[in-house]
Amino acid sequence: MPVDESKLSEEERIVYNALKDIRDPELGFSIVEAGFIDEVKVEDGRARIIYHLSAPFCPPIFALQIGLDIKHKLHSLPFIRESEVILVDHWQSEEINKAIRDYKP
């Protein structure tokens, strides 16, 4: 389910808008415009993003790249100190989420 922008805090809205710059490397459009972002939470400098892709069998390399791009984008924002980026509904989400967790931007 797409994020309801009207329910976002100011910081969450900044994060959400920053994510609009990230493009699906296979399809070429914004992950926000595609509706891939399921949750945006920001509290005390910690961001949590939950995302999915267009199909559970999207190439894992693209799923990982999107997750790393999200994490990198989060840490480019001055008010984000920590982040959690979670891929859901993908056949290799466990492995991809571990790689995203281990990535240090």
Image (cartoon, helix red, strand yellow):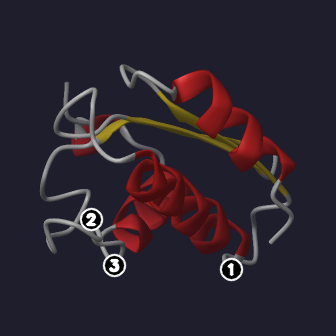
Q: Nearer the N terminus, badge 3 or badge 1?
A: 3
- Expressed as whole percent of the image width and height from the top left, the position of residue 58 reads 27, 42
Secondary structure beneath disc 3?
loop
Q: Nearer the viewer, residue 57 or 71?
A: 57
Residue pictured at 61% horizontal, 38% vertical: 96
Front tag of 2 and 3: 2
Disc 3 marks a residue whose amino acid type is Asp
- Expressed as whole percent of the image width and height from the top left, the position of residue 39 reads 42, 33
Residue pictured at 47% horizontal, 56% vertical: 61
Which residue corresponds to mark 2? Answer: 24
Disc 2 marks a residue whose amino acid type is Asp
Say above or below: 101 vs 34: above
> Residues under labels 3 and 1: Cα distance?
12 Å
Give left or right: position of 101 versus 71.
Answer: right
Residue pictured at 36% horizontal, 19% vertical: 89
The circle drawn on residue 76 is 1
- Expressed as whole percent of the image width and height from the top left, the position of residue 70 reads 53, 61
Which residue corresponds to mark 3? Answer: 21
